[in-house]
Amino acid sequence: MTLRFRIVLLGWMLLGFSLSLSAGSIPTTRLPKLRSAAVLVKDQRSGEFLVSKQANVAMPIASLTKLMTAMVILDAHLDMDKVITIEEADKDTLRNSHSHLFIGIQLTRREALLVALMASENRAARALGRTFPGGVPALVRAMNEKAKALGLNETKFEDPAGLSDANVSSAHNLGKLVESACGYPLIGMYSTQHETTIQSGRKRLRFVNTNALVRNPRWQIGLSKTGYIEEAGRCLVMQTQLAQRPVLMVLLNSTGKNTRLGDANRIKQWLEGPKPSRKSRK
């Protein structure tokens, strides 16, 4: 190999490296330590995986399940204005989780979907399953069929609320699921709504989004869902804008109440760089 050829080759290599930095997605700075057991961050524009940590390991996903529940409900083209009543059968007898929806309250299917996605209301998700044609078994069957159609080979559902630890998926599969859910405008709108109220007689019930980041002006979030049961830890999936590009983010089995939010913020800062320091006023 002549010296001239080596110089030309080196020039092309440096040019290629420069182009990969300018057009690529991964920062040159070291990724901070993330405390979630499984992580996936994907650039939707390029298809590049920016972060991948135990992304193919199936694990319980808790209320992230409700995204699939919502897709199947919407696929069925049911009457969203139909009034449904919360019944004893909708109670969580497995984990005795708290609910603002008292037995006997009436709400539309649309309102049930909203609070299931936004506030992760388990009774709302169970009522959506109970009133699905064929009941909960038919809904769960449709959820698993849709998972198979989407190529989610590490994903399985046992209930529509995510209370069962047999509802499992991997970060990689959930990335696909979130990308599919982004095709449903109502899911994006409901899952990122800050809060809502439901009027029942003289009672006015207030529901707040379980993801505090949707209320943070520094974040532009197009879709969001949180989840928690003991076996799953704290989970979070989002479609968001980071460093001026659309990104899918999956964080599974975070220990500690705020760890998933901390990991999300660490990833955001890593991709966008540190905040510019404020100049002192003269």
Image (spheres, rainbow, N blue to C red):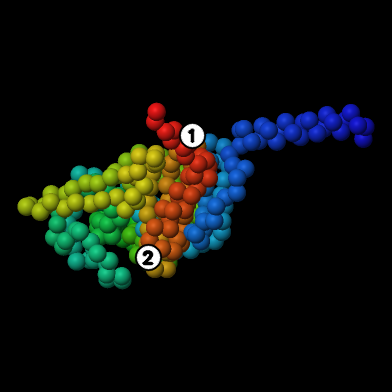
Q: Quadrant of the N terminus?
A: top right
Toward the viewer: 249 or 156? 249
Q: Position of residue 274 (x, y in %)?
A: 50, 41
Q: Residue at x 66, y 32 (%)?
A: 19
- Residue 238 seen in the figure: yes
Secondary element under disc 2, as helix, strand or loop, is strand
Q: The disc labelled 2 sits on which kind of residue?
A: Ile
Q: Position of residue 239 (x, y in %)?
A: 43, 43
Q: Quadrant of the C terminus?
A: top left
Q: Quadrant of residue 186?
A: top left
Instruction: Return the disc, 1 or 2, that comes first in the chain's sequence.
Output: 2
Q: The disc labelled 1 sits on which kind of residue?
A: Gln
Which residue bears the numbered disc 2?
A: 229
Q: Where is residue 100 in the image (x, y as percent from the top left)?
A: 20, 59
Q: Quadrant of residue 11?
A: top right
Which residue bears the numbered disc 1?
A: 244
| Outermost residue to the front | 282
- Residue 140 seen in the figure: no
Q: Which residue is drawn at 29% across and 50% down?
A: 209
Q: In this view, does 223 lie above or below 170?
A: above
Q: Which residue is drawn at 55% across and 52% down?
A: 32
Q: Mark 2 packing: few (<14 Cα in 10 Å), some, or many (20+)? A: some
Separation of marks 1 and 2 at Cα, in angstroms: 33 Å
Secondary element under disc 1, as helix, strand or loop, is loop
Q: In this view, does 253 lie above or below 185?
A: below
The reply to whether discs 1 and 2 touch (Cβ–Cβ < 8 Å) is: no
Q: Residue at x 60, y 49 (%)?
A: 30
User: Nearer the viewer's eye, disc 1 or disc 2?
Assistant: 1
